[in-house]
Image: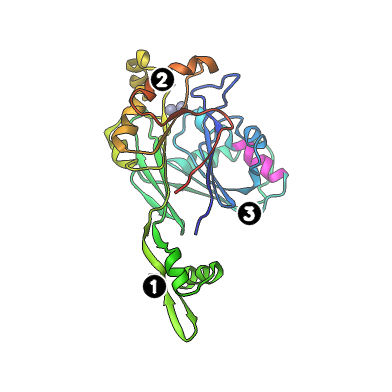
Amino acid sequence: MISTVKIVFFGTSGSWPSVERGLPSIGLQVDRDVILFDIGEGTQRQIMQTNISFMKIAKIFITHFHGDHFLGLAGLIQTMVLNGRTDPLEIYGPRDTVNQVSNFLQLGYYSLSFNIRIRDLGEDEEIDFGDYTIKTLKTVHPVTNLAYCFKEKDRKRISQELMEKFSLNSREVDKILRNGSLEKNGKTITIDDISDGIRVGRKIVYTGDTSPCDCMVEFSRNANVLIHDSTVDSSLEEKANEYGHSSSRQAAEIAKRANVRYLFLTHISPRYRMNDVKILEEEAKSIFHNTMVAKDLMEFTVTI
Ligand SMILES: [Zn+2]
Ligand SMILES: [Zn+2]
């Protein structure tokens, strides 16, 4: 059972960094575990500016092998070694990830102090991690880019009223959630006895790099948060689409059609200084109100 889901934007630039923005990397804190989506150059230093420990990173998902999205990997791994990591690390990405990452791990002289499990993912694959799943979708980009969907599993909603009816305290409810039932006063109480419906799990989608794509509407349907490529404003969208990127206007159209709750614009071209991003925000907000331009080190707690 998951309690906290928090998004931390470590890097929000695209292609190359700017003074104000680092290269793409988004952290998802799921209780004590940290999942990283992309790891652009400089990500480890960004992480160190937050209260998230880089040693707690359990899984890294790479969207694609353009340098801005993965070149921070070797540095982070070598720092983990120097800090005596022994916990295994899982690395996932599109086809060729095993090959690309294995080559990358050969850089420099050091010995790994922990196991790294690397896995190529399919273009429409779902991995089950117990309390949540991660699903992939191939987007529209010159090289294979996988968008990722984090989905907390739906579960039965516990009714306060029914808890009182059976005189249960929260510790007893936890036991029922864990074991399926509990004996109390000679009676067996099950989850169904204290549930009054379904609690829909949180859903977060990160596109990586993509031009606007109808498939993203279905993939991010009713998500709590959509984090979408928004490299430029609409005056430059034709060129951006040619290179496999989206404008803020196009990201907002997708968010609206998918009926998501919040849209975060990211992969902001370094041509925009901090004060220039207003245009991206205004364009998107005129279509989809709940839009924010992501900033480095911005945090967002995702509630049910
Ligand atoms: Zn990129
Ligand atoms: Zn790219």
Secondary structure character of the magenta stretch overall = helix
Tag 3: amino acid: Asp
Q: Depth check: 15 or 5 in front? A: 5
Tag 2: amino acid: Glu
Q: Which residue is found at the position 57% from the left and 26% from the top?
A: 22
Q: Residue 76, how many percent across, how many down?
A: 63, 38
Q: Depth check: 85 or 50 in front? A: 50
Circle 1 packing at 10 Å, graded few (<14), some (14-19), many (20+), is: some
Q: Is residue 124 above or below residue 272?
A: below
Instruction: Specify whether residue 273 is in view.
Output: no
The disc, 2 or 1, on the residue closer to the chain's N-terminal end is: 1
Tag 1: amino acid: Asp
Residue at the spot of label 3: 87
Q: Determine if the magenta segment contains residue 245.
A: no
Q: CA distance from mark 1 to mark 3?
A: 40 Å
Residue at the spot of label 2: 282
Q: Which residue is found at the position 63% from the left and 37% from the top?
A: 47
Residue at the spot of label 1: 193
The span shown in magenta is 74-82
